[in-house]
Amino acid sequence: MFTGDHVLPYISPNVSLHADQEGSSPLRDFRDSLRKVAAYDTRLALPAHEFTIPDLPARCEVLLHHHDARLDEVYAAIGDGASTAREVSTRVSWNTGPFDDFNLFMKRSALGETLSHLRLLQDEERVRRLDDGERVHWSKA
């Protein structure tokens, strides 16, 4: 199966929430699609880059577990009050280093990924989105 950038052998693709996706949950869609792909009878997965994936269902399970852990980490990073997505992003452990050391493109990607996790947590009613007209904050429900 050709998986493109959908399933990669080492890294998780960036699953971001952007302004034009306010009504959707990209992380929910990504997780649902991982489950669908994992159900196919495949002998070998061929991603767009890196190396071949000999066990696609196992790799999909690793990615699902990664995002489960990241959801918990993002939830904890909100803290006891209300936090902006940027504040949450600075408290998340990124495998490429601390958020404040990222270049502008990496910060944008990390922020989009944090937002996609916050959106799914909101859909699951674990967090609330608070918009005061100037800034959006997130708090635990």
Image (tube, rainbow, N blue to C red):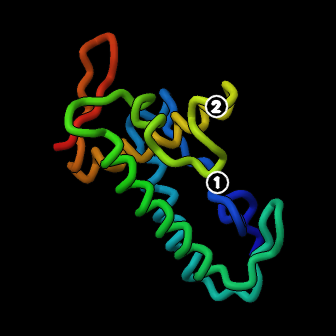
* Residue under pointer 2: 101
Q: Residues within 10 Å of mark 1 (few under 14, many from 20)?
A: few
Q: Position of residue 105 (x, y in %)?
A: 68, 29
Which image quadrant is residue 138 in? top left
**Can you give x and y, in whole percent of width and height, for residue 40 in the image?**
61, 83
Instruction: Spot the residue most to the top.
Output: 134
Q: As rendered, which of 17 and 141 lies closer to the eye?
A: 141
Say what secondary structure mark 2 lies in: helix
- In this picture, residue 135 sits left or right of residue 5: left
State the SS at label 1.
loop
Number of the label disc, if any, that sits on residue 13? 1
Q: Tell me how far mark 2 sits from mark 1, CA to CA.
A: 20 Å
Q: In terms of sequence position, does the residue under pointer 2 or pointer 1 come before the other?
A: 1
Total labels: the figure holds 2
Q: Residue at x 54, y 41 (%)?
A: 16
Q: Amino acid at mark 2?
A: Asp
Residue drawn 47% across the image and 60% down it: 67
Query: In percent of the image, x 20 and y 38: which residue is there?
Result: 80
Q: Which of the two marks, 2 or 1, is nearer to us in this view?
A: 2
5 relative to 127, above or below: below
Q: Which quadrant, please, contains the C terminus?
A: top left
Q: Is residue 93 left or right of residue 104?
A: left
Image coordinates of residue 1 in percent, x first then y, are 75, 76
Residue appearing at x 67%, y 60% in the figure: 11
Kind of residue at disc 1? Pro
Q: Residues within 10 Å of mark 2 (few under 14, many from 20)?
A: few
Using the image, determine if residue 4 lies above or below residue 84: below
Instruction: State the mark number for residue 121.
Output: none
Q: Position of residue 51 (x, y in %)?
A: 83, 70
134 w.r.t. 58: above or below: above
